[in-house]
Image (cartoon, grey):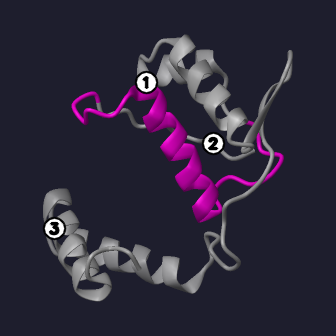
Amino acid sequence: MPVVVFRIDRRSGVATYLQIVRQVEQALRMGALEEGDRLPTAAQVAATTKVNPNTTLKAYRELERAGLAEVRQGAGTFITRSLAQPGSGPDWPLRSALNEWMHQARAEGLGGAEVQELFRASFEEAYGDGSG
């Protein structure tokens, strides 16, 4: 069973439940979560993130409303569909190349903020206004 680890940024200005929703959506796009996978319980999320269980439940209800998850009474919350594009799983060559680049940047002493700035600049160069 895949393990989803939520990372909550309390300074981001984004509501906590929306951060959870967006992280699940991202995991679905990247193929890290697939149809049938079980999400962690609200208690498990609370234990790892110090987020109120009701906040997680609100996020899961939002995922259910969007047709991405299903709450099964007594069994948990399960993914009902994927957002992954064909070939976007963990063994996708582009993802592998990006992971290799990230490890190389770290090995060369670049910090997270420097990598993000380099990525942002490269992204803007390739995609212009970000609309694709």
Q: Which residue is mark 2?
A: 3
Picture quadrant of residue 58: top right
Q: Which residue is mark 3?
A: 117
In this picture, residue 119 sits left or right of residue 74: left
Q: Which residues are magenta?
A: 10-38
The amino acid beneath tag 2 is Val
Local SS, label 1: helix
Question: How packed is label 3: few (under 14 Cα within 10 Å), some, or many (20 or more)?
Answer: few
Local SS, label 3: helix
Picture quadrant of residue 65: top right
The tag on residue 49 is 1
| Of the two numbered discs 3 and 2 in the rendering, the one whose residue sits closer to the viewer | 3
Q: Residue at x 74, y 39 (%)?
A: 69
Q: Residue at x 71, y 77 (%)?
A: 86
- Could you tell me residue 95's position as x and y percent? 50, 76
- The CA span between labels 1 and 3 is 27 Å
Which of 79 and 93 lies nearest the eye of the viewer? Answer: 79
- Could you tell me residue 96's position as x and y percent? 50, 79
In which quadrant will I find the N terminus?
Answer: top right
